Image: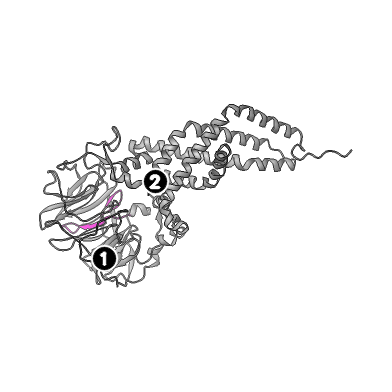
Amino acid sequence: MKNFWKKYHKWVGLFFSFFILMFCFSGIVLNHRTLFSKAEVSRNWMPESYHYKNWNNGIIKGTLRLPDGKILAYGNAGVWKTDSCFATFADFNRGLAEGIDNRKISNIVRVANNDIWCAGLYSIYLLNHDSWKEYPIAGNDERISDITQRGDTLVILTRSYLYTSVSPYDEFRKTELKTPENYSPKTSLFRTIWLLHSGELFGTPGKLAVDFLGVVLIVLSATGIIYTLLPPFIRRRHRKRLPVKTQAKALKTSLNWHNKLGTWLIGLTLLLSVTGMCLRPPLMIPFVLVNTRPVPGSTLDSDNPWHDKLRSIRWDASRNVWLLSSSMGFYRINDLQLPPVKLKQTPPVSPMGVNVFHPQSPDEWLIGSFSGLFVWNPSTGTVLDYYTGQPPAAVHGRPLGGSLVNGFTDDLVTREVIFEYDNGARNKENNLVLPAMPDLIKQQPMSLWNFCLELHVGRCYSPFLGVFSDLFVFISGLLLTLILISGYIVYKRHHKRRKKIMDYIIILIEDALMHPYFFSYIPPKS
């Protein structure tokens, strides 16, 4: 075992250093989404599944018909002006913030006075002729989840609060929804581990601390590579009678920092590695099912019962109530000043949240997510699968359905069109044929944040790993954990002899500098 740990740390660490660097760089970007919101990456650098084809990958989430018959289509790449056949497309993003991440549009609505509003991740915009004008929401520092309307009232939903405004929309009133009946402040253990892994559990200081650990792992990888690859290089220079003083100094410095950082911070780096393993299959499953009280003093320990839980909201005109979708389920709100009432018989929704919240008829709503598409009657509680007309099947294992629904429209001449994240546009009968996507849209980039997300969770390696891509994070975390532990074992085992060994190495290097033929000595002929 003595040599095993040493060899494991050296060779597995050297091999895995590339993935450690990718984890660290991507993790730092993921921790600062707004900072990198303008940065983009070409999809040509990604596997084929990430390319736009047949209106897939969230390019279209919904549409809004204009008075002149034209249609505004919106989604992950901003807003586009088209016709009812999807035959012509024109860029309609003028005035929106730069960067594809800033142009991820959740909804577009028309209020009673015919003003048209849209919501991006960080701002809302009013359409002024052919350009969008940004309307900041004073006091809001959260991502925007949804935008909707009731008559002339504009309603903005962030992750934790609700904002309302009426014409001329100069001021937004902030509302914290009341605590619902039978509310439990507990949260899933999975979410706690997730926020602990990113550092967000303790706000900005926590995220900066995790960023620091990412930098530490980068330094450990870099110094480990130097210490492994530099000695042969030094020996070659000796044989060629070249100076090696600089290289020898770099070797010593790398080893010192590698050992110091590795031993001082092993507890925190192990925590980062283990919590990352728990966020992907197979370890994530039990943590999703376990609820626990929020960590005191953390961001989860909020007086607002809806903190980071709001996803989408619509006005149900036939019942004169608000329908609210949240991470805790669906709720009915009779009055914004009264506690929301949880609805018991509701459609299944994936953890990623609702993507389609569309009135099908006065009594029914279309609810779509990565769990599928369903027809829902809130009054009777009836839920039917949109495709089969049957009650939804029980979900086992991964919380994803057979249809990863990302968007919907009934504004086209083809009537109802569903947009699936993986397969793209289709209808109920799955015989829909739409015009080919214009090159202008197919060439839309991916945000750097989304690219780093795919890199961090290993999905972009799926062409190489196949079905094992789901286990990439778990296996990577296991390897990293063993690399850290093996390094600590090797260091402690040789700690008492380290000083003597380093002194001996220095003597050898100094002797080599004085004798150019030290490493390639040939006895003189007698």
Q: In this image, 55 relative to 468: left or right?
A: left
Where disc 2 sits, the SS reads: helix
Q: In terms of image quadrants, where is residue 86? A: bottom left
Query: The residue under label 1 is which amino acid type?
Result: Ile
Q: In this image, 380 relative to 161: left or right?
A: left
Pointer 1 or 2: first along the chain? 2
Color style of the picture: one colour
Residue 332 in picture, x, y percent from top left: 14, 50
Between marks 1 and 2, how big is the CA–CA gap?
A: 34 Å
Q: How many neighbours does mark 2 have within 10 angstroms: few (below 14), some (14-19), or many (20 or more)?
A: many
Query: The residue under label 2 is which amino acid type?
Result: Leu
In the figure, 306 relative to 360: above or below?
A: above
Q: Which residue is mark 1?
A: 71
The magenta region covers 104-125
Magenta stretch: includes residue 123: yes
Q: In terms of image quadrants, where is residue 250? A: top right
- Point out which mark residue 132 bears: none
Residue at the (34%, 39%) spot, across then down: 200
